[in-house]
Amino acid sequence: MHGAIVMDYIKSRMAELGHAQYSLRLRHFVIPPSGQGYDYVPGQLMVLVEPVELVSIVSDAGFFDLSAAKSNELQYEHTGMVTISNYAGNQTAHVRFVQAIPK
Amino acid sequence: MSRKLLSTVLCSNVLVQKRGERVAFQILLPRDVVRITGIETGVRSRYCRPVVAYRREDTAGLLTLQASGTLGHCYSSYVKVDQNYQLQQDLGYQKYIAGFRYGNDLLANTVAMGAHREPDTLDIVAPRVLLGTYTDQWGDSMWRDMAYRLSIYLWVTINDEYNETSALCTEQ
């Protein structure tokens, strides 16, 4: 997803949720081979900036995995408990999000 | 004009075909729906004959619903497939008369007929779109691709004043 689209999306989504003021953070997760990363962001938005291969992202709001053929749709927006799993055995994964935190 | 509130049920179907499949879907609610008061789910197999069971399992999958314009789920629950277990007995059929030549495990695992369940309470203001996700677990537990249809029945309250106003506009 293009960065400008992410910013436009967050702006309209936060307005929809009733948050006129919010702060943004750029999050860059580095996940070791066969490792996992976690973050707990209740009431906040985490929007995936770009698709990442060999990585599974599961959260309260959605699921993202380019390798999984069992889902008919993938979600870029995440919230709540976000779990990032890297199932590449020999490759470190870099996963970038934009996080919106209501003030 | 007095506000007339009526209750009705909306049905939406989701088709599951693969083992462990995760289906994302959207339910577009009519504009006259003002509130969702309950939810009921049912599962119906797409096979013409009963499926040979690997083992007895009554959980079909996990259904989660999210109202548009909100964050987080408004409903999250496991869908059960235990309806016809009692229905066979209600009909007074023995398994041979009913045409099933396998054991009771088979009867517990097939969804040949519908049956009634009490709706879960889901008391929320109706959104324009209900975003849903269904994750199959039945196929995983049965070790096969289970093809079935998940039916979601939404018990809703509608504001009939909206329809009366629309009818007046149409007449003019």
Image (cartoon, coloured by chain):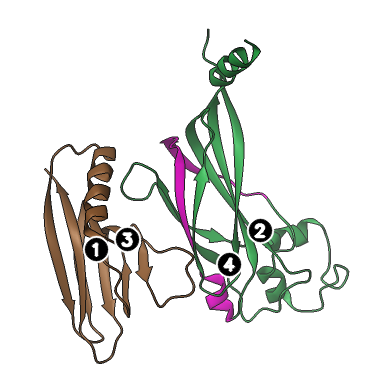
Chain colours: A brown, B green
Per the image, the residue denoted by label 4 is B58
| Disc 1 residue crowd, few under 14, some 14–19, many 20+, Cα 10 Å | many
Residue sitting at x 30%, y 47% = B71
Per the image, the residue denoted by label 2 is B83
1 or 2: mark nearer the eye: 1
Q: Secondary structure at mark 4?
A: loop
Locate the C terminus of chain B by quadrant.
top right
Q: Position of residue A25 (x, y in %)?
A: 11, 57
Disc 3: host chain: A
| Disc 2 residue crowd, few under 14, some 14–19, many 20+, Cα 10 Å | many
Q: Position of residue B68 (x, y in %)?
A: 39, 43
What is the C-alpha distance between the residues marked 3 and 2? Answer: 36 Å
What is the C-alpha distance between the residues marked 2 and 4? Answer: 9 Å
Which quarter of the picture shows residue B49?
bottom right
Q: Position of residue B116 (x, y in %)?
A: 66, 49
Do residues under tags 2 and 4 come within 8 Å of each other at their CB atoms?
no
Per the image, the residue denoted by label 3 is A76
